[in-house]
């Protein structure tokens, strides 16, 4: 399966942020977007899922954005989770929010990723305000990736995490790719850009182009 994503020119008032862009995403492949700070990398990721003028093609046939969202997840660098809920309650909220019908399979996936992250059942019953930043990130990633998505968008997934958490997330992303899924991510950490990406997009002079 191949996605082609077309994003119109992005601008704020009269300031152009990014010219019209096109990305091609293939099954089982990982794509990194690079560029200087403020070049529009995060804006592009956000607009892919929220922009009213985004055009999505699946195997050359245009699909609506809602259908695309059902099989895609976006993980920002500061995940939107509720500190006063437990980890388990946050997972249940995501399940309800996305109206997941096969809850048994969703919870099976949650358990699998919790095991990969060594996130204990006991910690899931603690309120999230007691979690470290790394645990919060893992919790939201688990909640979203367990939806049986096939494309994951990540904004700086490694930046605020310690080395151990970085390696754990790297291993989970490799497992995700091995299942035939795809990644589109932003990072400025050379180690993960080189190890994790099959192809690299670069934003330079307000234009998105392919480096490899």
Image (cartoon, rainbow, N blue to C red):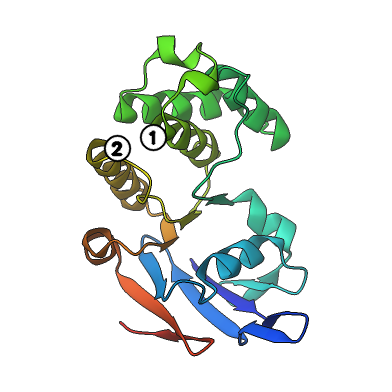
* Residue that mark 2 sits on: 165
Q: Residues within 10 Å of mark 1 (few under 14, many from 20)?
A: some
* Mark number displayed over residue 126: none
Image coordinates for residue 24, horizontal then vertical, percent: 48, 76
Q: Residue at x 47, y 32 (%)?
A: 136
Would you place residue 45 above or below residue 144 in this image? below
Would you place residue 13 above or below residue 197 in this image? below
- SS at badge 1: helix
- SS at badge 2: helix
Quadrant, the C terminus = bottom left
Q: Earlier in the sequence, mark 1 or mark 2?
A: 1
Report, in whole angstroms, how far the alpha carbon at label 1 lies from the one at label 2: 6 Å
Q: Residues within 10 Å of mark 2 (few under 14, many from 20)?
A: some
Image coordinates for residue 168, horizontal then vertical, percent: 28, 38
Q: Residue at x 36, y 51 (%)?
A: 159
Image coordinates for residue 167, horizontal then vertical, percent: 24, 42
Q: Is residue 49 left or right of residue 207?
A: right
Are the two marked residues, 1 and 2, in contact with CB atoms closer than 8 angstroms?
yes
* Mark number displayed over residue 134: 1
Instruction: Please state the total of marks drawn on the protein image.
Output: 2
Classify residue 200 by image quadrant.
bottom left
Q: Residue at x 65, y 58 (%)?
A: 68
Q: Residue at x 37, y 47 (%)?
A: 176
Q: Is residue 150 left or right of residue 63?
A: left
Would you place residue 64 above or below residue 76 in this image? below
Image coordinates for residue 210, horizontal then vertical, percent: 39, 84
- Foreground pick, 125 / 3: 125
């Amino acid at each position: 399966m191949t996605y082609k994503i077309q994003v119109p020119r992005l601008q704020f008032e009269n300031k152009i942020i990014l010219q019209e862009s096109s990305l091609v995403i293939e099954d089982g492949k990982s794509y990194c977007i690079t560029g200087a700070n403020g070049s529009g990398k995060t804006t592009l990721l956000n607009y892919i899922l929220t922009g009213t003028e985004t055009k999505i093609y699946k195997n050359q046939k245009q699909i609506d954005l809602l259908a695309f969202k059902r099989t895609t997840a976006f993980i920002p660098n500061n995940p939107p989770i509720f500190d006063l809920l437990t980890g388990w309650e946050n997972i249940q909220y995501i399940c309800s929010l996305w109206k997941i019908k096969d809850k048994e399979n969703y919870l099976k996936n949650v358990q699998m990723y919790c095991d990969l992250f060594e996130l204990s059942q006991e910690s899931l019953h603690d309120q999230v305000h007691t979690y470290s930043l790394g645990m919060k990130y893992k919790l939201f990633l688990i909640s979203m990736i367990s939806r049986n998505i096939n494309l994951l968008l990540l904004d700086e997934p490694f930046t605020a995490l310690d080395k151990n958490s970085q390696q754990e997330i790297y291993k989970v992303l490799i497992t995700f790719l091995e299942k035939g899924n795809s990644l589109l991510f932003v990072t400025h950490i050379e180690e993960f850009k080189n190890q994790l990406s099959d192809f690299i997009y670069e934003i330079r002079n307000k234009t998105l182009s392919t480096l490899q």
